[in-house]
Image: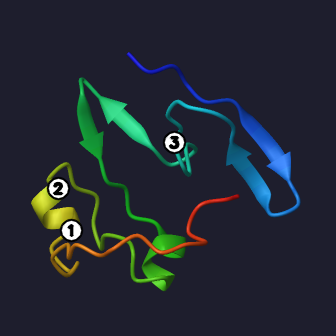
Amino acid sequence: MVPEAPIERTDDGEAPVGDGWFVLNARDARWLNDDVVYPRSELALRHAAGVERETREPSEAYAGSPPDEPVAFRGGWLPG
């Protein structure tokens, strides 16, 4: 099991420090009996990243997303 990464406030906002996991937008994240719920979010919809209606189905939540494409790592993607 990987521990939760502590969050640190930086000039660019809050960021996880060290190794571990973290949840973005935890206020809207919900897990019910190990099922993920994808809630409707006006903010996410404004950025073409939301679902029109709440669902538990990943295939429905990601239906409008293009398929993943492998890309080569580029310098500058990770903090130095």
Query: Residue placed at 29% from the left, 29% from the top?
Result: 32
How far apart marks 2 and 1 lie (CA) works out to: 6 Å
Secondary structure beneath label 3: loop
Mark 2 against mark 3, which lies toward the viewer?
Answer: 3
Which residue does the image show at 20% across and 80% down from the upper left? 64
Q: For residue 4, which quarter of the picture?
A: top right
The answer to whether residue 6 is left or right of residue 66 is: right
Residue 36 position within the rendered picture, expressed as x and y whole percent measured from the top left: 27, 41
Earlier-in-chain disc, 2 versus 3 = 3
Please rate how many residues cluster around mark 2, counting C-alpha atoms within 10 Å: few if below 14, some from 14 to 19, many from 20.
Answer: few
Residue 2 placement (x, y as % from top left): 44, 21
* Amino acid residing under circle 2: Pro
**In the displayed structure, would residue 33 be above or below residue 16?**
above
Quarter of the image where the N terminus is located: top left
- Position of 33 compared to 6: left or right? left
Dot 2: element = helix
Kind of residue at disc 1: Tyr
Circle 3 residue: 23
Residue type marked 3: Val
Q: Sequence order check: which comes first, mark 1 or mark 3?
A: 3
- At label 1, counting other C-alpha atoms closer than 10 Å, the crowd grade (few under 14, some 14-19, many 20 or more) is some
Mark 2 vs 1: CB contact within 8 A: yes
Viewer-side residue, 31 vs 54: 31
Pointer 3 local density, CA inside 10 Å: few below 14, some 14–19, many at least 20: few
Residue annotated with mark 1? 62
User: What residue is disc 2 on?
Assistant: 58
Q: Position of residue 35 (x, y in %)?
A: 22, 34
